[in-house]
Amino acid sequence: MGQRVLIAQPSRQLVAETEKRLLDFSRRPLHRFDTDTCGSGRVKAALADHLMHHAEPGQIVLTTHTALLTLPYFHRREDWHVIIDEIPSGHERATNSTWPRNTPS
């Protein structure tokens, strides 16, 4: 089957670049969640819905630090390998009160 992988990056530009690179060599299902793909104000809802209802094994999810850090609930977080590209800034951590509650222990 395969593992579920979520990659969080500092900006949607980096997420877009990673998506392009992965599409070139990976056959795994790839899902991107940022304001370019979901629209302003819809990213968290779309990501939460995907994690709750469409989290089939073997997929890769790409999103931003902001989306992950402010996600109110991470459904079955123990089933995911979460990769955070670059350490979120102190400002990001201080202003996003759900961190680290929504990440695996």
Image (cartoon, rainbow, N blue to C red):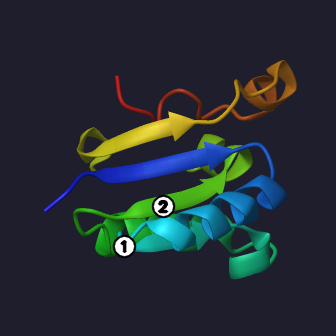
Residue that badge 2 annotates = 61
Q: Which mark is residue 6?
A: none
Residues 52 and 11: in front is 11
Of 27 and 36, the residue lying toward us: 27
From the viewer's perspective, is 54 left or right of 50?
left
Residue 14, visible in the rendered structure = yes
Q: Is residue 74 above or below residue 22?
A: above
- Residue 93 position (above or below residue 81): above
Label 2 CA crowd tier, 10 Å (few <14, some 14–19, many 20+): many
Give the Cα separation between the discs numbered 1 and 2.
13 Å
Q: Amino acid at mark 2?
A: Val
For residue 73, above or below residue 78: below
Classify residue 54 as left or right of residue 85.
left
Residue 75 screen position, x and y as percent: 33, 53
Please name the residue that numbered disc 1 is placed on: 27
Residue at 55 percent of width and 71 percent of height:
24
**Which quadrant: the N terminus?**
bottom left
The residue that appears at 30% across and 67% down in the rendered structure is 55
Residues at marks 1 and 2 touching, judged by CB atoms closer than 8 Å: no
Given the image, on which type of amino acid does mark 1 rest? Arg
Of mark 1 and mark 2, the one earlier in the sequence is 1
- Visible residue check, residue 75: no
Q: Residue visible at 53% across and 26% down?
A: 100
Residue depicted at 38% across the width and 74% down the height: 29
Residue 70: x percent and y percent? 65, 46
Q: Nearer the viewer, residue 16 or 20?
A: 20
